[in-house]
Amino acid sequence: MTANSDRPGGAGRRGRRPFSARVRLLGLIAALAAVLLAAGCSSASSSSAGSASSSASSSAASGTAAASPLGKAGAADDVGITATTIKIGLIADVDTTVSPGLFQKSVNAVDAWANIVNASGGLDGRKVVVDFCDSKLDPNATTNCVIKACQNDFALVGTSADALEDLSDIDGCKNAAGKAIGIPNLAALAFLPLGCDPDTYQLEGLGSYCATATDATQTYTVNVGDARYFTSKYPGLHGIFVYDSDVPSFKITFIPQFQADSNLGIGEDAQKFYAESGAAPQSALTPVIAAMKAAGSTFIDADATPQNTILLEREAKLQGDNSIKVWGCDSGCYDNSFIQQGGSVANGTYAQLNNLPFYTDYQDNAALAALVKQVGGVGGVNNNAIDAYIMALLFQDAVQKAVANGGTLDRATLFTALKGETSFDADGIIGPTNIGGHQPSACDVIAQVVNGQWQRAYPAKAGTFDCNPANLVTIKMKVTT
């Protein structure tokens, strides 16, 4: 495999692998009440939620998607839009008992985007106002947040609400004319069934599954870029695949991904697919490693929770299992807190990302550098924050397309523009992605823990991704819970 160097920047696949919503939040919370290690749920600030700032920043970033210049606002007529402002809703779980400050960094990232845009003159000649509502991991609070946004905000941007399962308030949201047109929901986090909601746009690319969800057999389009890399680098791999059992739908969505990886030539050992709770103690993992040791396994795709991955690695060390060549994880592990908690056993762990590896690459991308500057350093971001920022950039791009050539800005034209986002790359933070068609990207990048630090492993050049079309495969399966 060779890196796609035709366009620097890009991303794609199971950094939040399709359907994993890149967080595996419930299992993560069960395992880590004090320390979050997630991909969608990377470690978050413990600071309490605050109102989203709408003031302009004095440090506009060069190189981000061009904001509208100061001047007369274009034509607009809908909820959340005035002659001077565009008000967006941001629903996120922040003030939670089990994990204070859960998605605070995501809120900060959307605030940062608004500051950058406002400092450059606003969006469509208007100041962006972020209307934050804390969903608190509570279904009732989440519903109230959606209702509030429907009545007051133009769109939802950066949604990070685990308990958002009732879609009627999104899809039935009325516009200024009283028509139930729905509210555009640009989600950073979308578990099923939200992931299949037609008014919701995200990076996961669940279109193939959603279109066949009620069929006898489902169709999945998955990115196997990391498996292609591993099988090329380490021929003859065989081992097991682990997924999070705390969210029932994960079995339906992870198993096809694992099977597609195995079809590339990764042999299946023992039970091959293992369901593990994020709250499982190390002792519960003893039989898993024992089975791997007996089979001489050389591969493990550990996609339960980062905590579970650490415990598996510790158990392998305890049992003296040195045959494993690939410790694979998804973007949930791409967080410095994973290394801090895992210590030396974290060395060698791989993580597949569908966005630039921000620890090493943020200075190589202007839009990413702008975010890091706004939040006070790379420690102020995690993969949740990156997702929220990407959704904000998507909103910005869609608004600009909706008003191009004098068009009127309203929810209907925004929906039309979002459907046309068939090659969105968030200014190079991700690879070209057909978000409008709800399809995954072929692009990915592999990171690895080397000497206690996350390093870019493949492709080697900063700012690039492997966007080989062969990374996307289609698989048909029926998986039941």
Image (cartoon, rainbow, N blue to C red):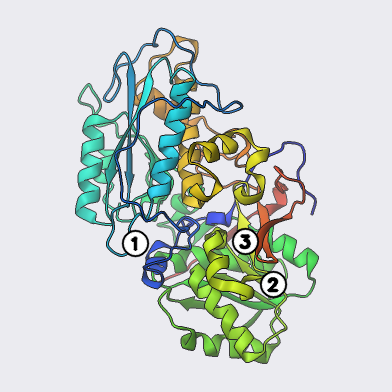
- Which of the two discs, 3 and 2, labels the residue nearer the N terminus? 2
Q: Can residue 424 be seen in this view?
A: no
Residue at the spot of label 2: 326
Answer with left or right where residue 260 lies relative to residue 341: right
Q: Is mark 3 on a helix, strand or loop?
A: strand
Other residues around mark 3 within 10 Å, as few (<14) / some (14–19) / many (≥20): many
Of helix, strand and loop, which one carries label 1? loop
In three-dimensional space, the C-alpha distance between marks 2 and 1, rounded to whole angstroms, equals 31 Å
Q: Mark 1: few, some, or many residues within 10 Å (few <14, many ≥20)?
A: many
Q: Earlier in the sequence, mark 2 or mark 1?
A: 1
Q: Nearer the viewer, residue 439 or 144?
A: 144
- Distance between the alpha carbons at the discs numbered 3 and 2: 11 Å
Farthest residue, direction top: 72
Which quadrant holds residue 133?
top left
Image side of residue 300 versus residue 51, left or right = right
Disc 2 packing (10 Å; few <14; some 14–19; many ≥20): many
Residue shown at the point (49%, 84%) measured from the top left: 282
Please give the residue where the numbered disc 3 appears in the rendered image: 351
- State which quarter of the image contains the C terminus: bottom left
Query: For this view, does 176 lie left or right of residue 260?
Result: left
Of badges 2 and 1, nearer the viewer stands: 1
Instruction: Please state if 230 lies on the left or on the right of 303 as rendered.
Output: right
- The answer to which of 138 and 414 lies nearer the viewer is 138
What residue type is disc 2 on? Val
The image shows residue 440 at horizontal and vertical percentages of 57, 47
3D distance between C-alphas at marks 1 and 3 = 24 Å
How many numbered marks have been drawn onto this rendered protein structure? 3
**Mark 2 and 1 residues: CB-CB less than 8 Å, in contact?**
no
Residue receiving disc 1: 99
| Mark 1: amino acid | Ser
Q: Nearer the viewer, residue 106 or 284?
A: 106
